[in-house]
Image (cartoon, rainbow, N blue to C red):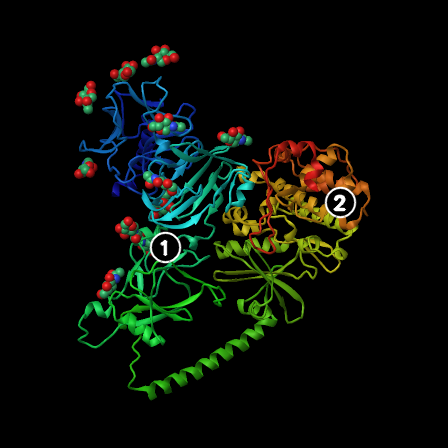
Amino acid sequence: MDNMKNPWLKLAVLLFMWVSLDCRLSFGADTISANQSLSGDQTIVSSGGNFVLGFFSPGNSSNYYIGIWYGKISEQTSVWVANRETPVRDIRSSELKISDGNLVLINGSGVEIWSTDIRTSNSSSVVAVLEDTGNLVLRDGPNSSAPLWQSIDHPTHTWLPGGKLSLNKRTNRSQLLTSWKNSEDPAPGLYSLELDPAGTNSYIIRWNRTRQYWSSGPWDEQSRIFRDVPEMRLNYIYNFSFHSNENESYFTYSLYTTETISRFIMDYSGQIKQLSWLESSRQWNLFWSQPRQQCQVYAFCGAFGSCTEGGLPFCSCLSGFHVKSETNWNLSDFSDGCERTTRLQCEEDPGRVTGKTDKFRESPNVRLPESARSMSAESMSECESSCLEYCNCTAYAYDSDGCRIWMTELLDLQQFSGDGSNGRSRTIYIRLAASEFPNSSNNNGIIIGAVAGSVGLVLCLVVFGILRWRRQRMINPKVEGSLLAFGYRDLQSATKNFSEKLGGGGFGSVFKGTLPDSSIIAVKQLESINQGEKQFRSEVSTIGTVQHVNLVRLRGFCSDGTRKLLVYDYMPNGSLDANLFHEENSKALAWKTRYQIALGTARGLTYLHEKCRDCIIHCDIKPENILLDAELCPKVADFGLAKIIGRDFSRVLTTMRGTRGYLAPEWISGVAITAKADVYSYGMMLFEIVSGRRNSEQCEEGKVRFFPTSVARVITEDGDVLSLLDPRLNGDAPVDELSRMCKVACWCVQDDETHRPSMGQVVQILEGVLDVNVPPIPRSLQVLADNSEHIIFFTESSSSQSSQTRSYTSNASSQAKSNTSSASS
Ligand SMILES: *[C@@H]1O[C@H](CO)[C@@H](O)[C@H](O)[C@H]1NC(C)=O
Ligand SMILES: *[C@@H]1O[C@H](CO)[C@@H](O)[C@H](O)[C@H]1NC(C)=O
Ligand SMILES: *[C@@H]1O[C@H](CO)[C@@H](O)[C@H](O)[C@H]1NC(C)=O
Ligand SMILES: *[C@@H]1O[C@H](CO)[C@@H](O)[C@H](O)[C@H]1NC(C)=O
Ligand SMILES: *[C@@H]1O[C@H](CO)[C@@H](O)[C@H](O)[C@H]1NC(C)=O
Ligand SMILES: *[C@@H]1O[C@H](CO)[C@@H](O)[C@H](O)[C@H]1NC(C)=O
Ligand SMILES: *[C@@H]1O[C@H](CO)[C@@H](O)[C@H](O)[C@H]1NC(C)=O
Ligand SMILES: *[C@@H]1O[C@H](CO)[C@@H](O)[C@H](O)[C@H]1NC(C)=O
Ligand SMILES: *[C@@H]1O[C@H](CO)[C@@H](O)[C@H](O)[C@H]1NC(C)=O
Ligand SMILES: *[C@@H]1O[C@H](CO)[C@@H](O)[C@H](O)[C@H]1NC(C)=O
Ligand SMILES: *[C@@H]1O[C@H](CO)[C@@H](O)[C@H](O)[C@H]1NC(C)=O
């Protein structure tokens, strides 16, 4: 090994590795025929180069599998695995070949460890062809059309476009999409997606093939969505369709655009996910997943594990238990759960000779596990004793629902944070060996009391001292550059322990507070930050230097371990959505104010895009993020957060309810995000400033208006622009300004970002310096009108956070074509 220090040798080794990499043998063909076999580094490649088949080894595993992966992306991503449960170690001596009319995998000892397992006529003309769709097909001769076997009928964890997940109506068995065990083990995991065998035309996800924990709701053929997945309306990528005959029913999907590389997986996190490949950042971009919350996945943390939403990692062991398999746990595979650190007394000493008994540890604010047994008990101690009677009893709960005990491993426990205001929050008492508790012997009560008393006194003094010290510090937060650096307690006391909530978004809640100098502040508690201290401070100080009359000013920050908070000036008039969308007619914003808000917001964004040292893309422009000061002057909030939140930002954004109606198509199709994405969102917001309503709203039974389409039609057909104005203004707006604003809005939401104006141009147009032509109708708006059942935008009332979805239903395209105004009622 010492020899490795020799640089020449190192170089030689590197060279050898490079050469051997480059000389990978490859058939260069898409077919394995009867007289060929595949082993070692050999691969076959589909005719268009989209997919590759060969041996691969996931992650850091030393096991090898026959799999299919994408040929045109840099991160090896498997879409199908043959020998999921029977890996091979040595790929040089293993062979994939056609044998007796089957495709089989033979390991180094000549044992057949995987086979397509079909009965054929032992024809020597059987071939296996890898098609450009990712489907591996076994055929009797290259010209035979009916496949003998195809991989797409035996999906593993990926549902490829063109594939189907079906229910066999003759056997009532459904095909499963089964998660991997973890990122390094493709063996079938605990989670699977299938079409409900009961025939409800819904997809369900089950744990361990039994316990269902998610359902898509039934398919609605008219609006072409699953009932409980309303966000399918915003799906620009997947075209789902339902098919049924006497033998089977199934869904399949295709992609609207062939340029996108997208996949649908049953992830080992227990969630189904849709991801698109983002070539610019060379990573998979998650744009949809269900169930939305990790802790909704049944038993995600395994036996005696506890799931905490928003925690990282999500799982921890209950106190008194430790991780069963650290290797898997480190791979985010928590399914093995936890085991007792100390055996129970009753197991050690079944006859209770020592007289010691097990004890219980209180665990408040939890979601209780299922399968409890109800006991009759008058009191807590009676309930406790009834648990102690059984050695296999692991826990009890005693509250207004009576006494319940658990005779099994505890599964699916969730830890809620904070005040227990969650309706399902309960307290459970978990049984542990007595030795797990600190020795609280009771003989010397007085001495212990005295000791405790004096310790208490000292503690009080210390706490008092700290409080005083804190209070003194409070008056002088440290100054860092242009920003104030607050301590966490400073902000806790300034906000009265975060009691007055102003709002909450995907990145954290905002609270009102008052500084000692009686200036009013808004404190944002950031969530999901996994950024280093140094990087956080540097980003924050960059934001601190960005100051403009149309941008909310950052006053300071707090960085206390994982707790990151930002302190802003408080804006007394709240956010634009609250001012724009409320019901009261008398308070409708006047046209002049609206125009100034549009212009001011555009100026703020221009500053972010063009005038700062580094261009800042806001990424989340919507009325909720435009705040109004005492004079109703608009100020853009939350800029710069995209960089602080980092990689998670797009995930949060694209899965967040209430934001999607403002997102530019490139967020979902997976190309790079530029400042033009902000222009798109700004355009969507302009429409709402004109109408005073959300862009898509249900107006009457089943009918939905999508406002931008109406605007585009009126503008291009030179119709009556005043008909577009918020009716509460009674036509009180200059037609030229109104028309200018509508035209700019249509330009801003063009599908092709190069057709959208820059924010600087928008300012000039709104100022009247630059003229604006009649815009073309954006393709997505056109498709929406002509083809309303397929591509649909949707918005949700995000202020209420409820899932009140406004739907855009699909009635006849001809109607939308011939009569736009009927849709805008
Ligand atoms: C393999 O079989 C094909 C067709 O059956 C034939 O064209 C080819 O020459 C054979 N190759 C070898 C090495 O036998
Ligand atoms: C493999 O292990 C190394 C070090 O343990 C780690 O940095 C790397 O991320 C792992 N790779 C994968 C694909 O898990
Ligand atoms: C299939 O054919 C091959 C050669 O033609 C022969 O060796 C083999 O035994 C046959 N298998 C069966 C099941 O008939
Ligand atoms: C091949 O598989 C058999 C059965 O699973 C196993 O006993 C044998 O050790 C394997 N051989 C090699 C070289 O992995
Ligand atoms: C397959 O089709 C091609 C052309 O369509 C033909 O030339 C060839 O003979 C056919 N092969 C067989 C085995 O039928
Ligand atoms: C399958 O389910 C349907 C309806 O649920 C039922 O009528 C039918 O008898 C079942 N068939 C079998 C083979 O279990
Ligand atoms: C899953 O179910 C099987 C029986 O169907 C059972 O043997 C196994 O223990 C279960 N797995 C877990 C993790 O509970
Ligand atoms: C969606 O899929 C259906 C069924 O495959 C097809 O008829 C329809 O043309 C597709 N729609 C679009 C817009 O591609
Ligand atoms: C259903 O299965 C039967 C028997 O396998 C077959 O004859 C029939 O064509 C199938 N029907 C459809 C619509 O595929
Ligand atoms: C798991 O991760 C921890 C912390 O990163 C590390 O200390 C431990 O060695 C890892 N354990 C295994 C079995 O990989
Ligand atoms: C627990 O123990 C009781 C009595 O010892 C027994 O009846 C019961 O089946 C056991 N339950 C389980 C889940 O092992």
Q: Ligand 6 lies in which image quarter? A: top left
Kindly give the residue lying farthest to the bottom in the view shown: 446
Q: Is mark 1 within 8 Å of ligand 7?
A: yes
- Local SS, label 1: loop
The amino acid beneath tag 2 is Leu
Q: How many marks?
A: 2
Q: Which residue is mark 1?
A: 299
Disc 2 designates what residue?
725
Crowd tier of the residue under label 2, counting other residues whose Cα lies within 10 Å: few below 14, some 14–19, many 20 or above? many
Q: Is residue 258 visible?
A: no
Residue 290: image location, x then y, percent: 46, 47
Residue 359 percent coordinates (x, y): 30, 73
- Residue at (36, 76) in percent of width and height: 379
Q: State the residue at coordinates (41%, 71%).
A: 399
Residue 613, percent from left and from top: 63, 47
Residue 609 visible from this viewpoint: yes
Q: Which of disc 1 and disc 2 is earlier in sequence?
A: 1
Depth check: 632 or 9 in front?
A: 632
- Above or below residue 322? Residue 810 is above
Residue 769 found in image quarter: top right
Q: Which mark is residue 262?
A: none
Q: Marks 2 and 1, Cα distance to the nearest angstrom?
A: 52 Å
